[in-house]
Image (tube, rainbow, N blue to C red):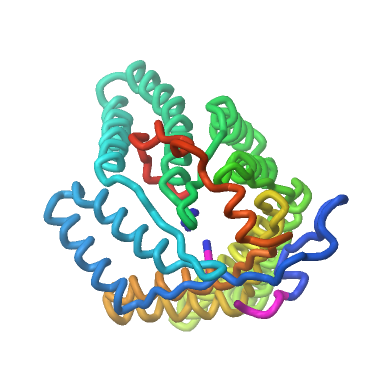
Amino acid sequence: MNEQLNQPGQPPASPEFSAATPPPPGGFAHRAAPEERFSFSGRGSEYFRIWIVNLLLSLVTLGIYSAWAKVRRQRYFYDNTSVAGTSFEYHGNAFAILKGRIVAFVLLAAYNFAFKSSPLIGLAIMLAFALAVPWLIWRSLQFKLYNSSYRGIRFGFRGKAGGIYLNYLLLPVLTVFSLYLLTPFTHQRIKRYQHGESRFGTSHFSFHASVGGFYKTYLLGLGIFFAGLIAILLLGGGAVFARGTDFDGSEFFSFGLMLFAVYVWAFMILPLFFTLLQNLIWNNTRLGEHRFSSRMRWPRLMFIAFTNIVGIVFTLGLYTPFAQIRTLRYRIESMSLLPAGNLDEFIADNAPQGSATGEGFSDLLDFDLSL
């Protein structure tokens, strides 16, 4: 489960905005069971009470309560997210989360102050920080999945540390040196590692989106953004710069209006990019033989994002929990499970035998990153 957790049905998205790809050769031509839609029953008024208490107690305790706040928030989201008539459960321990956050705080503090004392010490701390972050992400993935369950069966993460350092350290460094031309490739490899190494009971997830699919998604998003940007500059900038340096008040107003239009256009493109990515990722994810479907639509998500910003601004931030619930509901309810067979039999086959698998993970550190 993420956050990014991303989220909640709508009719099928148009091809250019769905980023859906057909199943690979050998995929399933027919489903043996009806589609199961994800649903989200959370309400803004309920979550507001949790949000405001979490915020106040975190402030009073100088952030210490934030670990307990996260557990309350996650349990609310999980309890209100369901598929096939059953909701998910979150079992995270606040003390384990607090330990992870203390480690993160110490690392960040050491990183920020090291260069003030000595450049050599600063470089050493920076290297230690770079080596520690992938390990913390690895433990975070283990913690979050092991502490999530459905119908009494835990999720899990089987990925090895070597995969974490390859996907979260080596590839990002290479991406920087490539002037970010490798960004879609690195993104695909990270999602393949995350999804491909995750499991539900004894069944494993798999990820089938290609590198080419990620490049198409990035190029489509960037292409639409730059097309709109050029149109704004041509329409708004032509009149401004035609006068050269002979500006008066109206030209300064036009220039400010043009910059505002660029900002609004960038804000409108973000929902498009998130829509493309969620649809691409989940339309190419499977659990055993079962497939997932995501049908997010850009206009709907853009409307939600725009009205959320308006609500947050006019309420001085108090609309934030309502905005989070609206976005989460749409993202979750855009998701479906496409069973390849009887779900009850699948659940029974994945029921834990003897002691729970991964019991040793119960005290894992949690590093609160949005993965």
Residue furthest out toward the right: 25
Residue furthest out toward the front: 354
Image location of residue 325, percent across then percent down:
41, 72
Residue 53: name its quadrant. bottom left
Q: Say which residue appears at 42% left-offset and 61% top-offset.
A: 78
The number of numbered badges drawn on the structure is: 0
Image location of residue 73, percent across then percent down:
33, 60
Residue 261 seen: yes
In this view, the residue in front, 277 or 26, is 26
In this view, the residue in front, 317 or 321, is 321
In this view, the residue in front, 277 or 175, is 277
Q: Is residue 214 left or right of residue 365?
A: right
Q: Say which residue appears at 43% left-offset and 22% top-offset.
A: 127
Residue furthest out toward the left: 60
Image location of residue 144, percent across then percent down:
43, 45
Residue furthest out toward the top: 120
In this view, the residue in front, 341 or 111, is 341
Query: What span is colored magenta in the figure?
Result: 7-13
Residue 221 seen: no
Q: Is residue 347 left or right of residue 3?
A: right
- Is 87 in the magenta? no
Residue 261, placed above or below residue 54: below
